[in-house]
Amino acid sequence: MKLLENKNAIITGATRGIGRGIAIEFAKQGANVAFTYSSSVDAAKSLEDELNSLGVKAKGYQSNAAEFDTAQELAKSVLEEFGSIDVLINNAGITRDNLLMRISEDDFDKVIEVNLKSVFNLTKAVIRPMMKQRGGSIINMSSVVGLKGNAGQANYAASKAGIIGFSKSVALELGSRNIRSNVIAPGFIETEMTAKLDEAVVKGWTDSIPLKRGGRPEDIANACVFLASDMSSYITGQTLSVDGGMLT
């Protein structure tokens, strides 16, 4: 029995890294996947083909969830194409790292807009259909940085901490409609982005993690499968750290 059989999911920012890992695992577990991407058309086509080959329905949408009207249009298109929206995973995010003294206003605004406002936009876009069907699971991607802060990432930390407060509020508002809202806070996850880091930096990270390794996109994907499935039907308003014990 597949855990997400016949569920329809929206996953934002899915053409690489964690988002791609989630999309593939969801398809393996029987979910139909609507995913968004910003510019990489080839990567989106390749992912679409890979997901379809797993026997589910999959479609990529070039969409900027940071724009309110675009997010509403996306939800409308997915609803027409897939029939329902059972799971929303707000995964898309960017960084514009710098010390506070050097962060420009634009660098602050952009990170808040893409990382935090997009969560508001898409959550608002899916709650009507979810309320109508009296059920749904919203999973928002925060970060260990949202829980503990990080020098040089005041903008990113603010956006990721904001996601936690937002998600808890949504859990309180929509619990009576059987809509759950939870957060995943990944730690150091090995993706294309971290592959560019200096080896010594990576070793410093992994040495400080109790499990002595970086996480893999599948580690985050498995946590998402749990929170999207009926196995977690009594869990809402929670933040699940998937960080190898980094914040223990």
Image (cartoon, rainbow, N blue to C red):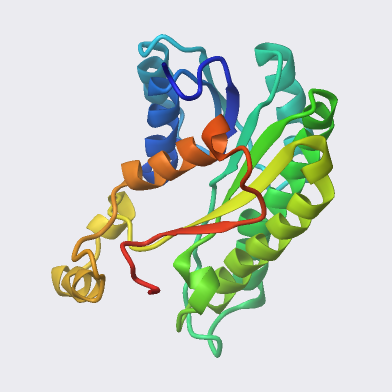
Residue 186 in picture, x, y percent from top left: 43, 58
Q: Residue at x 23, y 56 (%)?
A: 195
Q: Residue at x 46, y 12 (%)?
A: 56
Closer to the camera in the image, 89 or 1: 1
Q: How many tags in the picture? A: 0
Q: Is residue 201 above or below residue 186?
A: below
Residue 131 in picture, x, y percent from top left: 83, 31
The quarter of the displayed image where residue 159 is located: bottom right
Q: Is residue 36 visible?
A: no
Q: Is residue 185 left or right of residue 246?
A: right
The quarter of the displayed image where residue 79 is located: top right
Q: Is residue 1 visible?
A: yes
Q: Looking at the figure, which quarter contains the N terminus?
A: top left
Closer to the camera in the image, 168 or 56: 168
Residue 102 in picture, x, y percent from top left: 53, 85
The extreme bottom residue here reads 101
Q: Is residue 224 above or below residue 82?
A: below
Q: Looking at the figure, which quarter contains the C terminus?
A: bottom left
Q: Is residue 244 above or below residue 230?
A: below
Q: Residue at x 65, y 41 (%)?
A: 138
Q: Residue at x 18, y 74 (%)?
A: 207
The extreme front residue here reads 234
Q: Is residue 101 left or right of residue 244?
A: right
Residue 119 in picture, x, y percent from top left: 68, 50
Q: Is residue 91 above or below residue 62?
A: below
